[in-house]
């Protein structure tokens, strides 16, 4: 019962950290759009905390390059477990249109493990919300 | 009784002489320790026989009055000599004034000695003696390793330690004498010795800066001495006696209040209240044990002791009202100035002034609850401040700085000292510790006085501000791992730990402290204020559950300690630095891939609370208040 | 009051405190959402949050944070318990200040500039509201003749009628303590743009959960203080608290965050003037 309570609480209170990892800002705008009253994600208990120490969800947009890969890893490590990583947009998935650039490492999963991939250029707010909800299913599989 | 007082007053003088002439450090240290031990023991034994009074006729085979008189003139001429040596006109003037007045008083006014008893000891004196003898002795013990380090650091060829310890011990004797004296001439004599000791110790390092500050202290304290002797002359002509007990109980008439107001004024100079705070701030150049002993726990308490003593005489008058407002104002102003400081010793100095102001305010409110508050504040302030000064001394010798900013993350360098400092700070501002108990009583006692209470409310908020940030900074370092130990001389540990225990454990028994030591002070003029039941201090309008709160605090403390132990096993993450932190704590990756140190400084709000900005106005207001006090007494 | 009654009250305070505090938090979030034409989270949302936080991985920046978080919680709990024991108001005020100090000390123990600055802002907030709170307590004392809360409850007239300005002053303190705009300088429920999460930045997981619970206790304590102003009957108390809290939410939603200079100047100037006026009235009687 206790486990169920915890699982339930986790599902109902995902606090998110949004990191712009070298995106063209298209996906960022869509992510922020989710947080506006139009989509009102606070219905699901989602709050943008902007701080890895408090966050459960890590929304990453854009490609990873050799400079910001360190930041991505740092932020990921500062998040306490259990945590879910959602990569957003073609860039976050694979490097997108910047894939060929000399400084680009590639998608987010080159650096940290990714749980959900949300495609699109940019990804639509509905798709992002859907991605987050899908990610939350992961709590079912977490034992502790 | 005679033996005990002899040990308390005369023995330190004798050991001072021995210390001064011994060239060997070992012997000197053992003299200091033996004296400290004897002082502690005899002051404890004094508890049993208080109250008492007696008048010795001779001391060491000579007439006591003659000895005191000769030494008194000797001291005044010494001060005169220092005035000439350092070309300071004010000191010369005050010294001459005092010599003339003392001569006039002794040879023209006093026909025969009528004061009896010469020495009088009640609970108030006893409390002061315990503070002086115990806290003072502990500080002297800590100065043994401190001065050794100090001299090694300065690289002196001829040790100045004999002089140092001589003066320190001399001072202890003088303080004990001062609080025991009932004859005001004796009191004046000891008052002058402490002035001289303070001067000698501030100028101990013999650099240009220390001497300048010592001279400043000397002229301000001489002003106090001059006011004192003027007050004595007037008193003698008014009631024909210089007997403290008689003065307190004489009905008021004529110019009666003027001498009392002058004595209060003298007390303000001795306690470094505004506008005389500059001497205490300057005195911080002295070695730290000196600051601990003279400039926080004992000598500056002379002022508040005097006013508390005179309390029954001025009860219900305009004068006591003035003292209350003046004290409250000092409390607020000094706290505000402390907020603007980053120099650790200066923060301590301002906080001392501030607390003394609070005690003056209590003495001025002059109800039994307020007096109780004042005495509790005296006790706990002495212990905690001594502790904090000694800690800063140890820290300073280690990191070569007394700036609070440089103490960032001190925990990683000297964990035990840092912890003790934090405990010291906590006892300053948190319940159920004694200082807060005192502050609680002070606020409740002052609540009928609208000006005083508003000022106290503002002041106590400022106090919290400058202490809390200091405590936080000491711990400011990424840490989770093994506890480290640190090396310090054993005497340092003994003194720090005993003061630390004193500050915390004594707080827990403060209800009994109150019923044993403080209740006997109140005479018929005061109603007894608090009742002690099961460790709870209670009166009709309020209650402070000392023991239950202490127990809860202890439980909270242990739970928190357990939490720390658990946290030591937790995963350690670096502090948040927008994700660009490097493995080195507190640095981030800046432009061109260069590491940059992330710096955050405390808010000192110097645009509001800066020394330059506030001091003028504060001094102005203080002078107006003092003028009011003297004027009101006329 | 009998011993068993006292114990019952303490247990009630300690258990009911966070429950009420959490519920108030949930309602607050819903009402705020409605103000912004949103639906808002469920009422129990604060409990989900704290539950989740408590079950998260234990990470620390500095082990002393744990000490501070637990001490903060302990102090807040004790202050609420003391309130339910109807003890001395000034003592309660001092005990709750202990909690606030520990929160600050814990934040200072991290080297992150965000939490350092947050801690200093928290100190400035304390500087702003503490004197006001003392004056409110003094006002109650002058009126009822006692610092004990039991005396307030046995007073036969609502205090609000005699201390209207002091109630406004208490409102200032409440706004600061609830971390509402314009005084949400040190941290707030929402992400700060300039300060991440201010004073709580480097607390995470279970420790953050404890701090949240301690904050609930604080909220309850302050609302209890408000309720003293209409202590003659329960309905009056509840109505007074509800109106006050609703106004708090309204103020939160219509005002922007201000700087500490503005806060200190404003709160001291207005607060001290109002309390002075009100206290002078009382002294005149
Ligand atoms: S996926 Fe498209 S919109 Fe998103 S960051 Fe890449 S290029 Fe921009």
Image: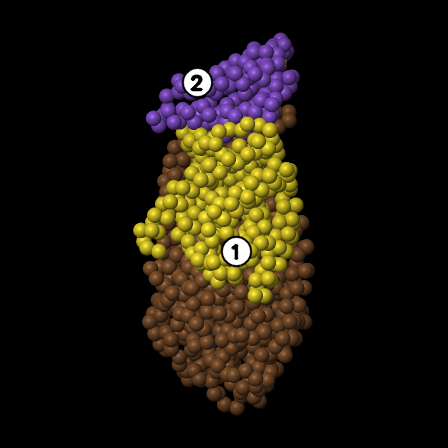
User: In the rendered structure, the residue with mark 2 lies on which chain?
Assistant: A
Residue drawn at point x = 49 percent, y = 43 percent? C219
Figure colour scheme: by chain
Q: Quadrant of the N terminus of chain C?
A: bottom left
* For residue C51, above or below residue B512: above
Residue A144, can we see it?
A: yes
Q: Residue at x 49, y 38 (%)?
A: C24
Task: Give the drawing colour for chain C.
Answer: yellow
Q: Quadrant of residue A20?
A: top right
Q: Which residue is identified by label 2?
A: A138
- Identify residue for label 1: C159
Residue shown at the point (61%, 64%) measured from the top left = B274
Q: Colour of chain A?
A: purple
Per the image, label 2 sits on a secondary structure element best described as helix
Chain in brown (letter): B
Residue C156 percent across, percent down from the top left: 47, 58
Q: Does residue B346 sit above or below A71 in this rendering? A: below
B310 above or below B607?
A: below
| Of the two numbered discs 1 and 2 in the rendering, the one whose residue sits closer to the viewer | 1
Q: Badge 2: few (under 14), some or many (20 or more) residues near its Cα, within 10 Å?
A: some
Would you identify the image quadrant in which residue B215 lies?
bottom right
CA distance separating discs 1 and 2: 55 Å
């Amino acid at each position: 019962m206790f486990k169920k309570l915890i699982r339930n609480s986790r599902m109902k209170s995902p606090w998110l950290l949004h990191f712009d990892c070298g995106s063209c800002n298209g996906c960022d705008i869509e992510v922020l759009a989710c947080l506006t009253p139009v989509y009102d994600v606070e219905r699901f208990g989602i709050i943008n905390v902007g701080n890895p120490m408090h966050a459960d969800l890590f929304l990453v947009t854009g490609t990873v390059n050799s400079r910001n890969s360190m930041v991505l890893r740092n932020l990921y490590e500062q998040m306490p477990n259990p945590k879910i990583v959602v990569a957003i947009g073609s860039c976050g998935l694979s490097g997108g249109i910047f894939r060929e650039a000399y400084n680009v490492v590639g998608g987010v999963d080159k650096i940290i493990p990714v749980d959900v991939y949300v495609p699109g250029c940019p990804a639509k707010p509905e798709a992002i919300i859907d991605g987050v909800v899908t990610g939350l299913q992961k709590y079912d599989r977490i034992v502790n | 009784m005679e033996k005990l007082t002899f040990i308390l007053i005369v023995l330190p003088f004798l050991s001072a002489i021995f210390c001064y002439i011994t060239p060997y450090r070992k012997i000197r240290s053992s003299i200091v320790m033996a004296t400290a031990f004897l002082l502690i023991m005899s002051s404890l034994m004094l508890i049993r026989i208080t109250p008492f009074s007696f008048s010795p006729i001779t001391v060491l085979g000579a007439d006591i009055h003659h000895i005191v008189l000769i030494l008194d003139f000797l001291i005044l001429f010494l001060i005169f000599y220092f005035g000439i040596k350092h070309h300071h006109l004010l000191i010369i003037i005050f010294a001459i004034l005092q010599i003339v007045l003392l001569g006039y008083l002794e040879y023209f006014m006093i026909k025969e000695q009528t004061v009896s008893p010469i020495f009088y000891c009640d609970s108030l004196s006893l409390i002061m003696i315990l503070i002086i003898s115990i806290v003072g002795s502990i500080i002297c013990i800590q100065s043994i390793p401190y001065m050794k380090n100090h001299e090694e650091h300065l690289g002196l060829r001829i040790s100045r330690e004999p002089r140092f310890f001589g003066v320190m011990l001399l001072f202890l004797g003088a303080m004990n004498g001062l609080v025991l004296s009932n004859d005001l001439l004796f009191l004046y004599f000891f008052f002058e010795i402490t002035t001289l000791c303070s001067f000698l110790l501030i100028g101990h390092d013999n650099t240009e800066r220390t001497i300048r500050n010592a001279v400043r202290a000397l002229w301000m304290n001489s002003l106090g001495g001059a006011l004192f002797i003027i007050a004595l002359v007037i008193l003698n002509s008014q009631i024909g006696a210089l007997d403290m007990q008689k003065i307190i109980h004489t009905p008021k008439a004529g110019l009666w209040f003027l001498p009392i107001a002058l004595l209060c004024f003298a007390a303000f100079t001795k306690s470094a209240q505004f506008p005389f705070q500059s001497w205490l701030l300057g005195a911080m150049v002295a070695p730290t044990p000196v600051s601990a002993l003279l400039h926080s726990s004992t000598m500056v308490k002379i002022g508040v002791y005097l006013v508390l003593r005179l309390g029954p005489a001025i009860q219900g008058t305009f004068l006591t009202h003035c003292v209350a407002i003046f004290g409250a104002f000092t409390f607020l102003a000094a706290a505000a100035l402390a907020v603007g400081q980053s120099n650790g010793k200066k923060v301590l100095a301002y906080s001392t002034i501030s607390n003394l102001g609070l005690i003056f305010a209590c003495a001025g409110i002059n109800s039994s609850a307020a007096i109780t508050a004042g005495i509790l504040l005296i006790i706990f302030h002495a212990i905690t401040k001594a502790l904090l000064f000694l800690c800063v001394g140890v820290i300073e010798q280690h990191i070569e700085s007394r700036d609070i900013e440089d103490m960032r993350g001190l925990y990683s360098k000297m964990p035990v000292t840092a912890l003790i400092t934090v405990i010291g700070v906590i006892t300053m501002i948190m319940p159920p510790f004694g200082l807060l108990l005192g502050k609680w009583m002070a606020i409740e006692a002052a609540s009928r006085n609208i000006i005083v209470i508003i000022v106290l409310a503002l002041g106590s908020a400022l106090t919290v501000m400058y202490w809390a940030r200091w405590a936080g900074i000491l711990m400011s370092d990424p840490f989770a791992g093994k506890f480290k130990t640190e090396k310090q001389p054993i005497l340092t540990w003994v003194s720090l730990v005993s003061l630390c225990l004193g500050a915390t454990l004594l707080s827990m028994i403060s209800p009994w402290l109150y019923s044993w030591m403080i209740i006997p002070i109140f005479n018929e003029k005061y109603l007894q204020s608090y009742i002690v039941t099961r460790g709870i201090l209670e009166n009709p309008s309020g209650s402070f559950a000392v023991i239950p709160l202490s127990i809860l605090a202890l439980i909270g403390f242990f739970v928190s300690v357990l939490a720390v132990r658990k946290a030591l096993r937790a995963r350690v993450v670096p502090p948040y630095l927008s994700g660009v932190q490097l493995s080195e704590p507190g640095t981030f990756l800046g432009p061109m891939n260069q590491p940059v140190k992330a710096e955050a400084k405390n808010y000192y709000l110097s645009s509001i609370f800066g020394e330059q900005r506030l001091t003028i106005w504060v001094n102005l207001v203080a002078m107006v208040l003092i003028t009011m006090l003297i004027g009101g007494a006329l | 009051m009998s011993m068993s009654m006292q114990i019952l009250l303490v247990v009630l305070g300690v258990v009911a405190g966070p429950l009420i505090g959490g519920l108030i938090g949930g309602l607050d979030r819903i009402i705020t959402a409605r103000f912004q034409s949103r639906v808002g989270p469920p009422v129990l949302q604060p409990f989900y949050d704290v539950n989740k936080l408590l079950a998260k991985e234990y990470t620390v920046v500095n082990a002393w944070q744990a000490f501070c978080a637990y001490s903060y919680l302990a102090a807040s709990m004790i202050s609420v318990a003391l309130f339910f024991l109807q003890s001395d108001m000034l003592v309660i005020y001092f005990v709750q200040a202990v909690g606030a100090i520990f929160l600050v000390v814990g934040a200072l123990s991290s080297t992150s500039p965000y939490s350092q600055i947050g801690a200093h802002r928290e100190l400035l907030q304390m500087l702003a509201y503490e004197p006001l709170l003392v004056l409110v307590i003094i006002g109650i004392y002058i009126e009822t003749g006692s610092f004990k809360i039991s005396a307030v409850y046995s007073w036969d007239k609502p205090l609000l009628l005699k201390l209207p300005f002091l109630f406004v002053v208490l409102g200032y303190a409440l706004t600061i303590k609830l971390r509402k705009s314009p005084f949400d300088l040190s941290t707030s429920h929402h992400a700060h743009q300039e300060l991440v999460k201010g004073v709580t930045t480097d607390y995470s997981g279970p420790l953050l959960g404890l701090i949240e619970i301690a904050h609930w206790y604080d909220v309850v304590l302050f609302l209890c203080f408000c309720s003293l102003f209409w202590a003659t009957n329960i309905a009056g108390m509840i109505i007074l608290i509800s109106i006050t809290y609703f106004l708090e939410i309204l103020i939160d939603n219509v005002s922007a965050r201000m700087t500490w200079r503005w806060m200190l100047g404003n709160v001291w100037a207005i607060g001290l003037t109002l309390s002075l006026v009100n206290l002078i009235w009382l002294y005149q009687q």
